[in-house]
Image (cartoon, rainbow, N blue to C red):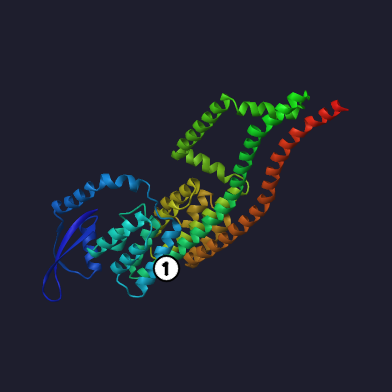
Amino acid sequence: MASFVATYTNASGQAKTLTLKATDVTEAKKQLRRRGIRATDLKPAQKSQASKKEDGATSGLLSFDLSKAFEKPPGVKEKAVFASKLAALVDAGVPIVRSLDLMAKQQKLPMFKRALIKVSLDVNEGVSLGAAIRQWPKVFDQLSIAMVEAGEAGGVLDESLKRLAKLLEDNAKLQNQIKGALGYPVAVLVIAILVFLGMTIFLIPTFAGIFADLGAELPAFTQLLVDLSELLRSVTALYAAGALLIMIWLFSRYYSTYKGRRSVDRIILKIPLFGELIMMTATAQFCRIFSSLTRAGVPILMSLDISSQTAGNTIISDAILKSRNLVQEGVLLSTALIRQNVLPEMALNMLSIGEETGEMDKMLSKVADFYEDEVGAMVKALTSMLEPAMIVVVGGIVGSILLAMYLPMFSVFDQIK
């Protein structure tokens, strides 16, 4: 994005200059018109000014590179709080630059704080808020940028920020529900594996030595665990662990490719219960985000593009992008999505009704409410089923090892008799 210098005359007849950033001269003129400024001269900023900024940034690059590498970008919750506070300040009549300065002082995340300071400086120089936050893709996602730009274009920035805050809060709530449903069984399973390895590596050898001294004959199940314990304590286990790490690394590399991600995401959608949960979550997010964007005045093609980025599953994301291409050719959105055969039928039927009645955004909002409630109910059902199942798994592991240790005692008692 280039810098431009505009020269204009204020109401007092004094000549003023204003520096703003835009993609080209046409965009720069649009920004000036929105601010009510009629420029007498508009030209690109001198290269020396830009180079000074670059030199200043380069001089501090070496000293800050390491610290910046470990900075945490803001999450959905932090963005929601920012949008909510900024909306309240703008609605109260606080100037946007002053509002950004206040938000920067209150911000604790270094990356977010640095971004807000730079955005405030850019806005003070005449850059629009949407163009300023677009320079920070790690801090502000496409959804936030689109909502802010739509609010600025329509003169309803406070309303757009309120909608953005509500949208981000709903997304954060939905993500927490999914993490709660998937996190519990994973955590319990990891604990169960650690307990099994600990008892197999440290407890079984002790009992095996005692049984060997007593001359007891080990049952087949006990002998199996003893052999497994010896294997885990041997060098072979290190090779197996190394092979496992290599497999995990290869899988991550494969999943990082477009083809690999599609293959894995397709399999995930076919997993019983969890696949349905992910599908309903993606449907709720798509309907909520698309509804909010179109209601804020964002063009439908851009709304579809942004919605595809937040799907969380490449199969669903690609279906939305293919539908976008069909919509660009003149096909109705509901018809385009039906052709992809990915989203649930109920959501597609409601979307079709919304298009017919001219209230698509309201209909999609209701669909999002429905699927968010369904996700919540499914999460509770899964949690209620998984809790006893995990207890049974952990109890079965511990009980099997204890049983293997006690079985040889019966042969010892028989010898004593």
Residue 162 position, x and y percent, is 42, 68
**Element type at mark 1:** helix
Q: Nearer the viewer, residue 281 or 61?
A: 61
366 lies above or below 208: below
301 lies above or below 64: below
Three-letter amino acid code of the residue under disc 1? Lys
Residue at horizontal 15%, vertical 76%? 11
Q: Is residue 61 left or right of residue 172?
A: left
Q: Residue 381, located in which quarter of the rendered image? A: bottom right
Q: Residue 140, located in which quarter of the rendered image? A: bottom left
Residue 229 position, x and y percent, is 65, 29
Q: Nearer the viewer, residue 301 or 183?
A: 183
Q: Which residue is mark 1?
A: 162
Residue 283 position, x and y percent, is 52, 55
Residue at horizontal 77%, vertical 27%? 219
399 lies above or below 346: above
